[in-house]
Amino acid sequence: MLSPIQQRLEDFRQQGRVQAGSLIISVFGDAVVPRGSRIWLGSLIRLLEPLDLNERLIRTSVFRLAKEEWLRSEPAGRRTDYLLAPSGQRRFEEASRHIYAASAPQWDRRWRLILLVGELSPKQREQLKRALFWQGFGVLGNDCFVHPGVDLTSAFDALIAEGLGEVLGKLKPLIAADTPYGSAASDLDMVHGAWNLDKLAAVYADFVSVYLPALAQLRGDNSQEIDDESAFLLRILLIHDYRRLLLRDPELPEVLLPADWPGQKARQLCQEIYHRLLPGSERHLDRHFQLANGDTPESAVSVFARFREADPLW
């Protein structure tokens, strides 16, 4: 019988279709950025091979990410390093503030709105909706996007990085303060109109059920039996799954969330598992992470501060 950690790794290997590009993004954000934001393609292939991702799939996915301006290549003799492209760096910086935060941000009781005040083609509208959804915006009607705490300047910068600079002239950013009035709709009404919290809660609950057995193993007497490679692989899957969760989460303030919201439990679970896996996973990277010139850069010490304070790396 497999241990909980080995079972999670095996479940990933056995799933039918793997979005390798998305997983590579998680690897870059979590493991490559702290070591200088670049890695030799051959080293990346070797790191992911134990998850049954073959070389051809990884190469194809990396080339696609470069085409989409997440990554850029830099030849070094007969080998090639891959680095974050400027637009990719911007996306990682935005994501890191959510992934590695020690707690949900405080709310100033103001809503950030982006109103669509001009006509967009169906393709542009869908691209805009997807890009703002990625930043945690909810939608009210067809032309109003709402968020409880995003920096609107950063949100517009992210749209430019997504190639949507041409639509900015048709968007109106606003900050709205709550003005209670009789029987007018409340903040809670707006939350329920803009986001599907029941669906999000179910996804968080699934995450907790998948990783809680792994935490029990890490806390147990047999935790020393977890090899460094498995620690690295589980760390990547943990952050990959958690990152995908946060893409759907606007990080609403506690006062606007139902009682016993599973998002906080998921954050605490991810935080503890991550720090228990760090020593072994970093030893694995020290042995197997390489640049095209053969060097192995050290990891920045601030990687150990993730989930505890603002992470300056991303």
Image (tube, rainbow, N blue to C red):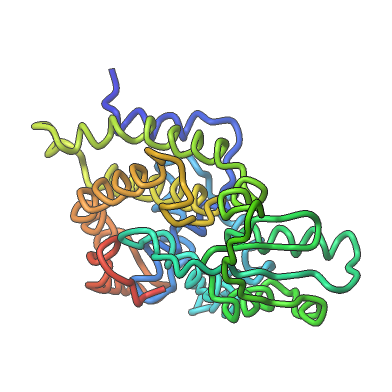
Task: Answer with left or right where residue 65 lies relative to residue 265.
Answer: right
Q: Residue at x 56, y 72 (%)?
A: 88
- The single residue placed furthest to the front in the displayed view is 182
Is residue 8 rendered to the left or right of residue 246? left
Taking the view exactly as shown, the residue that stands out farthest to the left is 221
Res. 214 image quadrant: top left
Query: Of residues 166 and 10, which is closer to you in this image?
Result: 166
Question: Number of marks in the image?
Answer: 0
For the N terminus, the quadrant is top left
Identify which residue, 242 or 194, lies in the foreground.
Answer: 194
Establish if 16 lies above or below 303. Answer: above
> Residue 292 location, x and y as percent?
42, 73
Q: Give the side of residue 89 with respect to residue 302, left or right.
A: right
Q: Give the quarter of the figure containing the C terminus.
A: bottom left
Res 255 visible = yes
Residue 62: give x, y in percent of width and height.
59, 61
The residue that appears at 31% across and 31% down in the rendered structure is 6
Name of the residue lying farthest toward the top: 1
Task: Residue at 44%, 58% (x, y): give it.
Answer: 27
Q: Quadrant for residue 283, please give it.
A: bottom left
**Residue 79 seen from this side:** no
Q: Residue 168: x and y, percent?
A: 76, 79
| Residue drawn at x 22%, y 72% as measured from the top left | 301
* Percent coordinates x, y for residue 186 in the rendering: 59, 53
